[in-house]
Amino acid sequence: MKKIHFKVNGEELSVTCPPAKTLLDVLRDEFDLTGSKECCGKGECGSCTVLIDGKSVCSCLVLAGQAENASITTVEGVGLIGKMDVLQEAFSDEGATQCGYCTPGFIVSARAFLDSIDYIPTDDEIKTALGGNLCRCTGYTKIIKAVQTAARKQYATEETVV
Amino acid sequence: MSKHTEEIQKLKSKQQLKWVGKSVKRIDGPEKVTGEQKYKTDLKFPDMVWGKVLRATYPYAKIRAIDTTKAEAHPEVVCVLTHKDIPGFNGFGIVTPDQPVLCEDIVRCTGDAVALVAAETMEAAEEAIKLIEVDYEPLDPVIDAESAMIQGAPRLHPDGNIHSHVTIENGDIEKGFEEADYIFENTFYSPRQMHAFIETEGGWGIMEKDGSLTIHCPAQYGHRDKLQIARALALNPERIHVYSSPNGGGFGGKDEITVQIYLALLAMNTGGRPVKIHLSREESVIAGIKRHSFKVTVKTGAKKDGTLIANKVRAVADTGAYASLGGAVTALAVEHASGPYKIPNVDMEGFCVYTNNGIAGAFRGFGVNQVCVGIETHIDMLAEKTGLDPIEIRKKNAYRQGELSSLGHVVGSSVGTIETLEKAKESDLWINRDLYKSQGSEPWKKKGVAVATSFHGVGMGLGTPDYGAATIELLEDGRFKVGVAIEEIGTGNGTVYAQVAAEVLRCNVDDIVVVQGDTKETLDSGTISASRSTYTGGRAIATAAPNMISLLTEAAAEILEVPNADIELADNKLIVAGDENSFVNYKQIYNKLYEKHQTTRVEGHFYLPREKEELKNSGGAPHHLYGYMTHVVMVEVDTLTGETEVLHVVAIPDVGKVLNPQGLEGQSEGGAVMGIGYTLYEDTLIEGGYHKTKNFTDYIIPTIRETPIIETIPVESNEETGPFGAKGIAEVVMIPIIPAIMAAIYDATGARINHLPATPERIYQAIQATKKQTLVSR
């Protein structure tokens, strides 16, 4: 057992657990952040995607000890009901979620992607950016559109701010 | 005309639909996109223990003995359970309960459960499972359905290996073939597709202080699960409460019992501590049901003018170790094997056969995916032989409403096949197909465009109960709580329920609270399967609504001191007819009813319409209702590697009135991509009874990169019996795309694939074979 410290969604947190426990299990079991899901446990599906220091990773493949002192963002950190991120609004408005189990992973991956660009991405760029997230319900079409809508909104807002 | 139809006709004729037919946003969208929605496997209860299932070591073996001593001695183990600990009937299965809850003397597949453990931690449960000693006598597994049918094959079940045999005959098949100018005969093989829902099977079992049992488990028919649990545990079903919604995906894969009985059994043995099971993906692959792989031989006879005159089909389905819904899948396959056509002479039969290849059961499309390829491929071959247009041949043979189907029954419900084919013909992709095909990205990559059409029954067919029920309750704050047991598994049916309720009650969609998948609070309304939930739930709500309106009217009349007849339903209120200023709102009505200690809850019940007579030996055919669909697709095949990409899909469904266009598109897009996976990539490989496929590392489902352009162009044939004219959508959306992709590969390369999935290897070899033939003929 080891005491491990993280910054999770802006909050300083620590946990005492075996250092080999996965970050996903820590987030879900210790912090009750259940937005991140386990689906394959092998880094194939992206349902457990979180940001570690701004970079999107599969939290099922990261051990708690490896994330010590890192800043972690989960889907709950991207936005919650009442204060949703543009991506979450777009996914909800445009029907880009069906069963919804994969959706948090998509939101986090898409957030990291939009943070890395400053324009409205093409279909192909979105397909590359979200290629690591599996969805079995939607056929992805509305996800592509939702990411573009969010980018359009975000880009417009940023321009206004500048 | 029923009261329901009258009410709806009135609303429709005035064209005053406010919610129905609009892309109302999903009511559960915000919870899903923020991760705030708690799935059953996200729940947490204090003082919990972890449950784990011991699966069989061999695909087919006798059990000589089970020794749990060492596992029980593990310091962190709470209980270890075997077949001896089952208080009731040791079996489950939707139709035939032939699957043991925990195996006693024999195992028939590697997904079989032999023992259960509950322990303080997941790790301890895993350790304890390994400490259980099972003495097996391995037997030679039966690994092929046709071999299983031969006399002398090892008998996997007491009644033999043929679980069911269904037939449909109409006309005179021999005469039909005699009259035919062309006869096509081919055999098609289909893959053992995996549902690959993103949330694996899991949940919670809790023995409450009052002795009742609570099960939280994502599922597709909580009310039936309750009965299956009660039977195995010898409990009063009224003392079992199942919470089965929301689901992280179903597609039929959670229609059968998954872990509910294990949860219940463990919960009875943990001294009141809640128990959780959540299968790893690897365990889900082994234990979960799959799509039946089929071998289908089809012989089709046709005239020179394109008239289909005879169709003979023999389908053999591998249901694996247990029946689950295999009999029904096989029956549906046979019912649909001659397509949405009026072929006068048919002779079709299907066998559902036991093997030791895992377990197969319900899966979106339910047998039709496997059989639609035969008739559709033969129509394309006929088009090529005769030079006739493939769309015109289909139109010529398609039955219209009121005509006889190939089964020989008059189809009384709405039929949109011809309209969908006309829309296909008018589509840009079809009109300009030669232009698109000429624009290859590389010289060795060839494009092809093709079309296919199909259909799918809505509801259960004959011989199975099929009913809907809804409750509507006026709440203290003036909103309405609408209860329909049919689960939310991703389809957005809850949003449609809110739309229908808001429309008939003339309130805002935000004023409807929907409750689903809760056996305590909702009435049994059947499964979320068979493309039935919009139709059934919608009708149930529309049936309950007049009862609520009567209740509201009486209370309003009392408050406003006028006769009932003077009260009129208006938007968000009830008024004295002709006087908008004399009104009461729903909150006032609630208060009035509360004062009078009167219930504010009403119910609506109805039975789905069905045909009068079942076709003999058909296993439930015909259905009363069908959804129809045409797909046009364009593929590009790399002729050097066989790799194939679907570039463009035009999806043209006839599902009756579209209640929510966004939801319909979502189904259409998801179905198309799942159909692409079925046709090109997906197969659960089992060798010698052992799964070679383990996880998503070796089971490839389409990613976002494989998503083509998908256009959805609905044809809205009005179905008189449906809620606002709606039928069902969820299954037909993945059916015609399968033969359409196969035909497009042929259009691109001249190679016909009869063994799915059409992997690069298979396509490459088929292309090579066409080249060889050319050489020989020279």
Image (cartoon, coloured by chain):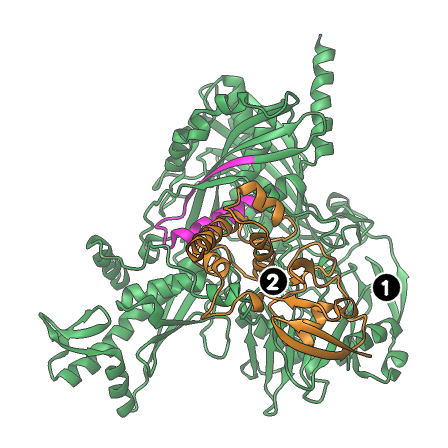
Chain colours: A orange, B green
Residue B756 point in image, percent of width and height: 67, 38
Circle 2 packing at 10 Å, graded few (<14), some (14-19), many (20+), is many
SS state under label 1? strand
Q: Which portion, as a residue range, is magenta? A: B647-676
If you read the primary sequence from the N terminus, does the residue marked by circle 1 or circle 2 appear first? 1
Residue B259 to residue B147: above or below:
below
Quadrant containing the C terminus of chain B is top right
Subunit of mark 2? B
Can you see residue B358? yes
* Closer to the camera in the image, B228 or B766: B766
Residue B548's quadrant in the figure? bottom left
Residue B131 at x, y percent in the picture = 88, 74
Alpha carbons under labels 1 and 2: distance apart: 28 Å
**Residue corresponding to mark 2:** B254
- What's the residue type where badge 1 is placed? Lys
Residue at x 74%, y 58% (from the top left corner):
A42
Q: Quadrant of residue A161?
A: bottom left
In the picture, measured across the screen, residue B21 lies left or right of residue B493, that is left
Q: For mark 1, what is the residue?
A: B62
The residue at the far top in this view is: B778
What's the residue at 71%, 89% (across, down)? B271
Mark 2 residue type:
Lys
**Considering the image in quadrants, where does the N terminus of chain B appear?**
bottom left
Q: Would you place residue A109 above or below residue B561 in this image?
A: above
- Dot 2 lies on which element? loop
